[in-house]
Amino acid sequence: MARQGITIEQRRALRRWAHRQHPKPTQKACIQWFQETYGHKVSQSTISESLSATFERLDTEAGAVSTSALRIRSGFWPELEEVLWHWQLRIEAKGAFTTGEILREKAREVWHQLPHYREKPEPEFSTRWLEKFKKRHGIRARFQHGEAGSIPNVEEAMEGLRLITKQYEEKDIYNMDETGLFWRMRPSRGLLSQSIPGVKKDKARITVILCTNATGEDRIQPWFIGKAKKPRALQGIDISGIGGVWKYNSKAWNTTIVMVECLQAFYRHIGGRQVLLTMDNFSAHIMGIELHPPPSNIRIEWLPPNSTSCTQPLDQGIIQNFKVYYRRQQLLIMLSSFDKEEDPYSIITLRHAIRWALRAWNTDITNQTIYNCFLKSTLISTTRPTSIPLCENIDILFQDVIRAGKIHNAMSLTSFLNPIEEVEEEEDTTSQGNMILHEVIQEHLGLLTEEEEEEEPEQPLPTLQEARQALQVLVEYTEGSNKLGKSYSRALERLTTDIEALVISSRQQSTLDSWFT
């Protein structure tokens, strides 16, 4: 559905109104206020973006428009400047940086794409105009963090970091990073020997943000980033209740907006503890810290640029183990489906993906593995060799799936576990800037359309009675098996007690409802 654009002044007014409301208004209330004020609707994602840290500068005096300054602030080409400034804000939010020449070049591009100007002669966009434009909108020179070559030697940089880590206990040293995950990836280009009409290439991808301390005893809940606000497969699921966080944007990437929220959650989690957080110089990390710096008890240190493959703890085997254990769950359900002559990809949904990822992160990866990865990164001093074991028998399970599914031209196990396409890479500044400029102009002209949610199978939630019956099967299996210890029986007993309490409560509520009908 097409939506009309939102101007900078409208964003400013929206932020001003929202900040004055107590309690904080819901996004639905903001949409209603905007429609009543300006006569057209905007999407929930536009509201979210407008109220995010990306447009924080609109709240400052530099971003305010006074009556006396109206003439100088509007400039000769107010519509063009509005689009250009909007582009500048988004570029900064992405962590990219502009120069005066880039701004002048983008101004020329915008001139020829806006109907109000395109038939008129192109202006010179002189240096004087550029300086006034920057002054009108409070644009100042910026310097990028972590430029390559600023530290002559990676080992020298790591030695400096180790001097810092020695000031902290190991439990107070953290590392945060993100990774892409093709959560429904196939072991080959197709599961069958012939193509199926109407079946498109599977592009189901999410980004996962992971963070842990060096001992592995404090693993921050994973942040999952997809394309849809509430995918159909997650309807009725409280992800926060099972230990995760769901965010969304059109690219399913870790953006500055997401990073700011993630950092805020990390600061709350740490509280008043004195800790060290290490990260690479990914643009979203840098801008997130700039927009929302940590409190004084949390220290941020950047890993040496262009070296994280060997210096970042999460890249030394933690993420690899996370994906191996995730793929293990995927292979098990594939094997079960093939044994029943079913297509596993008609069954696997995003709900499975979240469940498998949480299990891999919270249960399967050991504390020792995490600690060894911190040692291997040399962030923590050690003199002993370290080994990072992977999930046992994953190669046997992979071959079983290949045989059971009669998969032709199967990829290697290494490619299945670590596809190169999953690497969270940044686009170069030029292509990123062009894409953002196109989006800003389309939005300004009211031509931008909403991202459509990717179709996936519906998966209704089990009823309370179905859960009770399934639990009874587990209890009976445990009672008849000598392979599971008493701890499993005790855990099932506690779960049975809780489920039965819910059943009784549900029946009591049904009885009360019947009295009033």
Image (cartoon, rainbow, N blue to C red):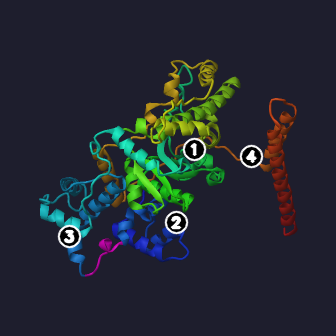
**Residue 215: mark:** 1
321 horizontally vs 334: left or right: left
Task: Give the x, y percent position of residue 346.
Answer: 62, 34
| N-terminal label among 4 and 1 | 1
**Residue occupying image coordinates x 54% and y 44%:** 214
Relative to the observer, which residue lies in front, 347 or 25?
25
Farthest bottom residue in view:
68
**Residue occupying image coordinates x 59% and y 35%:** 326
Residue 227 visible in the picture: no
- Mark 4 → mark 1, Cα distance in angstroms: 37 Å
**Residue 462: mark:** 4
Mark 2 residue element: helix
**Residue occupying image coordinates x 31% and y 43%:** 428
Q: From what the image shows, is residue 509 above or below residue 96?
A: below
| N-terminal label among 3 and 1 | 3
Give the residues in magenta: 60-67
| N-terminal label among 2 and 4 | 2
Q: Say which residue label 2 marks.
A: 27
Task: Give the x, y percent position of residue 41.
Answer: 46, 65
124 horizontally vs 353: left or right: left
Q: Is residue 226 magenta?
A: no
In the picture, the quarter occupied by the C terminus is: bottom right
Q: Say which residue label 3 marks.
A: 75
Question: What count of labels does the image hold?
Answer: 4
Relative to the observer, which residue lies in front, 461 or 478?
478
Which picture quadrant has residue 332? top right
Pointer 1: residues within 10 angstroms few (<14), some, or many (20+)? Answer: many
459 horizontally vs 499: left or right: left
- Mark 2 → mark 4, Cα distance in angstroms: 30 Å
What kind of residue is marked 2? Gln
User: Contact, CB < 8 Å: mark 2 with mark 4?
Assistant: no
